[in-house]
Image (tube, rainbow, N blue to C red):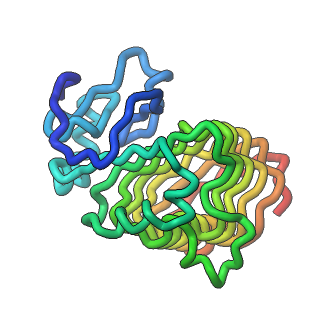
Amino acid sequence: MSNSATPNISSLSLASGTQSYCCWYCGRGEETLPTKLQKCGRCGLAEYCNRECQRGDWKLHKAKCKKLTQIVVDTDVKNRLRSGALQRRLLMLSEGTVILTIRDPDITTIGDVNLARERAYEAPLYGCKSLLRVDLKGCAKVISVGTGAFCMCTSLTSVVFPDSLIQIGELAFEHCSSLTSVVLPDSLTQLGDAAFGQCSSLTSIVLPDSLTQLVEGVFRDCTSLTSVVFPDSVIV
């Protein structure tokens, strides 16, 4: 691995600024580690705690290592989401090849929590199978992820949420069948029906102490889910 590798990527929109960094295999944040994360020497994008984590992830990573594309959206974010411009761009790219970072200090929602579930297909990133990883940490005022926002993003493996997030709407990540783990922020209070429904690769999840509302079908048909840690505050 090398920290100085030149990324072999096609950057559709790349900008400077603060990003969150976590190991692609174990999910630990760089701030919790004694040393900086190390980049994959081939793609220059995947980052790991150590060689053990890189080896553990290689079986999945090797197929797309040199095909990865980084997209950073930090201007006109609200319009790009509402108009469908970002979705159209993502739908043109190969499955599981995009690392999407959205940075906007002013937007408060990704999608619409009031969107009727039968209209989930209208959500801004619905069916974007090109998505591999999504980082929303740079959206410091986002309080909600709307109905169906990332529904049917079947190649999505990881999502980084902002610390401001309060609500994840219905069907928000339904059918994200490659999603293996989710770290929910301590600010979260509400999870909508089937928010993570049919996430068939999800194996475990820890619900934050801040959570107060949880409907029965949040993890409907998550066939690999073996561990859910509930806080004392939650009302099921």
Instruction: Please tell me which residue is depicted at 52% across the width and 48% down the height of the picture.
Output: 76
Identified at 78% across, 43% down, the residue is 210
Above or below residue 22? Residue 214 is below
For this rendering, which residue is in front, 4 or 71? 71
Comparing 9 with 210, the one in front is 9
How many labels were placed on the picture? 0
Residue at 19% over, 36% down: 7
Question: Can you give x and y, in whole percent of width and height, for residue 155 in the image?
Answer: 36, 64
Residue positioned 49% across, 57% down in the render: 80
Identify the image quadrant of the C terminus: bottom right
- Residue 105 drawn at (x, y percent): 61, 37
**Is 44 left, or right, of 187 in this rendering?**
left
Closest to the observer, 110 or 216: 110
Q: Say if residue 135 shows up in the picture.
A: no
In the picture, measured across the screen, residue 58 lies left or right of residue 48, that is left
Q: Position of residue 98 (x, y in %)?
A: 32, 54
184, above or below 225, in the image: above
Quadrant location of residue 217?
Answer: bottom right
In the image, farthest residue toward the bottom: 118
Using the rendered image of the protein, determine whether residue 182 is visible from the camera's viewpoint.
yes
Q: Nearer the viewer, residue 22 or 163?
A: 163
Left or right: 63 in relation to 206:
left
Give percent across and percent down for residue 44: 22, 35
> Which quadrant, please, contains the N terminus?
top left
